[in-house]
Image: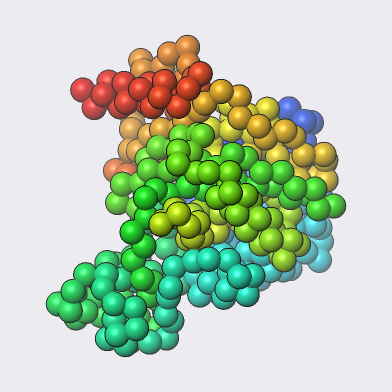
Amino acid sequence: MHIAIVGCGQLARMLALAGIPLGLKFSFIVNPDEQKDTACIDGFGTIACWQKGVAIGELYIALGRPDIVTIEKESVDLGLLTELEKYCKVYPSAKSVFYSQNRYHEKLLLEKLDIETADFKYGNSLESCVKSLGYPLVIKSISEGYDGKNQWRLKEQADIAIINQQANIENCIVEKWVSYEFEFSMIAARSVVGQFVVYPPTENQHIDGVLVRSIVPASQLEQAHIDTAINYIKKIMRELDYVGVMAMECFFADGQVLVNELAPRVHNSGHWTQAASITSQFENHIRAIANFDLGATRLTGSAGMLNLLGAGVPPLEVLSSQTSLHWYNKLPRDGRKVGHINFVGDSREEVLADIGAVELLMNA
């Protein structure tokens, strides 16, 4: 079986690394800008460049006539996915990706499914939003917003003029600020025939909107909260007839699970599954789109993940018997995710201590 992946970053790399031991073949679709930096996936298969105007049939042949096309990111051309569906299976579908490309459409989907999310407004002036929702507010671009990019905090009236200058409010949703206790994510997989598996919830810590570390099991979540979150992601995947791995990022606030956003792909907060789950999120994505039986997702012990941001060389000196390094071969720059370290241990406290020790060594 041959799978083509749209994208050439670390997620494409780790998908291929999970699929090659299964005997699968890979190729990759990149745009002209990405073509300059394909080190993540060099050597894993054919790389074909595509931009609007290039015939999809020619692209399909250049890729080696794959059986399935999948994605590593939501910022893909929906027209490309739709046209590729004429030649092979595309998972997740263009319809599924559509909702995650636009925060407003995503919010409407959550509302339709009676899934709790932050109160929001769309298509209104900031002054009107303040009257309806009060202070503070979060303004988010409806597209191209990730790792804290294209987001603004509105705390007082003086911020309105500043944000109006920096943001195109017509292309933003305005959310009521959620005073959450912590953030967590759910990673689930659904196969072509509807088989569903879900990983334990992962507690996440961000700095300036960028995920820095993850830890499982998540603290303070009672089984009722976990059941609610599982029901939410299962409901979303069933509604979209979704195939593959999906991530659902959530806030836990006042004893309530609020869904923040969806990602139609393998996710940074699921990297720990490479070290502490029977089947990683990457292998389960491959299994799901290839219509193989999905693998077990139970947690073995406790686990964590630390993102490596901007480092120029792999930090081999900080590794221990309880850690594993995943280096992406990406060109380093400030704030860029260039690798991650997975941690395993007998308890949450042990993993947290190990993460802290590595952070001290790297910052020394």
**Can you see residue 320?**
yes
Q: Position of residue 132 (x, y in %)?
A: 34, 83
Residue 53 appears anywhere in the view: no
Looking at the image, which residue is at 45% across and 54% down?
Answer: 255
Quadrant into which the C terminus falls: top left
Residue 96 location (% of width, % of height): 66, 64
Spot occupied by residue 197 in the image (x, y as percentages of width and height): 71, 43
Residue 195, how many percent across, how many down? 80, 48
Spot the residue most to the left: 158
Determine whether 78 is above or below 30 in the image: below
Tally of numbered tags:
0
Residue 313: image quadrant is top left
Is the N terminus in the top left, top right, bottom left or bottom right quadrant? top right
Which residue occupies 68% across, 68% down?
A: 95
Side of 330 relative to 198 (left or right): left
> Residue extending furthest top?
321
Identify the residue shown where x is 59% and y is 39%: 200
Q: Nearer the viewer, residue 49 or 187?
A: 187
Residue drawn 83% across the image and 45% down it:
291
